[in-house]
Image (spheres, rainbow, N blue to C red):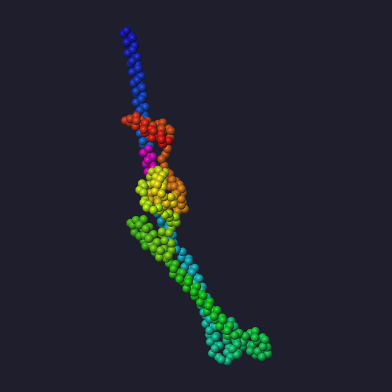
Amino acid sequence: MKDAEVSKINLLEEENKLLKTEVMKLKTEYCNVLQNLEEKKSELKEVKCLECFAQKLVSENLSLQTGLSRKNNVLKGLFFDPSLLQESASNSKDQIDEIEELAASLESLEQELARLGSRPGEFIVTSLDSPSWIRVGGRLTRASDQSDQKSDQGDMDSRIVTVDQFAAAMASIQEAIASLSQRINGQQAQQTEVAPPPAIVPIPISEDPHARMDKLEQKLRQMRTSEGAITWEDFDGAPVASLPAKFRMPEIERYTGIGCPRIHLRLDSTVMRAHGLDDAQMVMFFPMSLSGAAQCWFASLEVSRRRTWDDLAQEFLRQFAFNTVIDVSRRELEALRQRPKESVTSFISRWRRRFHRL
């Protein structure tokens, strides 16, 4: 009997040792699981930090692009080509020289006509690049050919020049001078309209660059408005949709560029369609559901890329795709473990939530 009891005690001790060994193994596994969990948490924190850093970079990039586009718009209005004034000045100088030549010719013709009218009988006219003429009975004939008038009347008729021809020449010259004067006056008026580029006053370095850009934009807008050119409000060619009667803008949480863009699109579409808005009206009111970096992105988006609601939705998802929720893989679901102080029901609920994200 004693041997049997001793053997039983030995067996129990061996079983106890085995149980202790298994308990140690379980503790070791538990420690390993906790260590892995801590590593996962640290990795998750790093991923979140990287996402926050990426979002900051995106917002900074959008702000830089917006500032750059504003600077380009301001500089486009300040650029001026001085060669236009030089070209117009050279053309005016050539026309003035031509007018002076015509005026000199006209003056010489008037002098010759004055000489013609001073003598009732015969007088000799010496015009520019022409031989001497003698007036006989209201007609002009060459002085060298006067001796041949009686002998050869047919040759004399071919060399007669009447006073009316001088008058016609004077009238044509006067018309040319008047037309050239009108052209010069028109070009001078255009030159007065084309003002030189405004002098840029140096601004202290301590001033905010955004405030500086706002001042330049305001000055450029005033210049364009005073000249009758296109104004700032005319740049956006987006179609304007009419609103339904008794419409009030619903309260929607503004999207700042952080979070899932698909969820925001679905929320905005559901609320706006419930209020009776169509696609064009939804496009017009979409920027009112944005703020921060997302609103800057919409302001810098070209009008041709947001004509319809589908185009706007695709551009919005493409811009903020990095915020889309990443699907859970099967391996992550299998690696999910119960926390030390977590109840079974809480663990099952958490597992089911993770499962529905597959």
Lateral position of residue 82 relative to residue 125, left or right: left
**Residue 49 magenta:** yes
Q: Does 189 sit above or below residue 56?
A: below
Kindly give the residue lying farthest to the right in the view shown: 151
Magenta-tinted stretch:
44-53
**Residue 126 magenta:** no
Residue found 43% across the figure and 63% down from its top: 229
Q: Magenta residues: mostly which secondary structure?
A: helix
Q: Position of residue 53 (x, y in %)?
A: 38, 44
Q: Between residue 353 and residue 168, name the one nearer to us.
A: 353
Observer able to see residue 29: yes
Q: Position of residue 349 (x, y in %)?
A: 36, 33
Q: Does 117 sit above or below residue 74?
A: below
Q: Quadrant of the N terminus?
A: top left
Q: Position of residue 17 (x, y in %)?
A: 34, 18
Residue found 58% across the figure and 92% down from its top: 121
Displayed quadrant of residue 10: top left
Residue found 68% across the figure and 90% down from its top: 151
Kindly give the residue lying farthest to the top in the view shown: 1
Q: Position of residue 118 (x, y in %)?
A: 54, 90
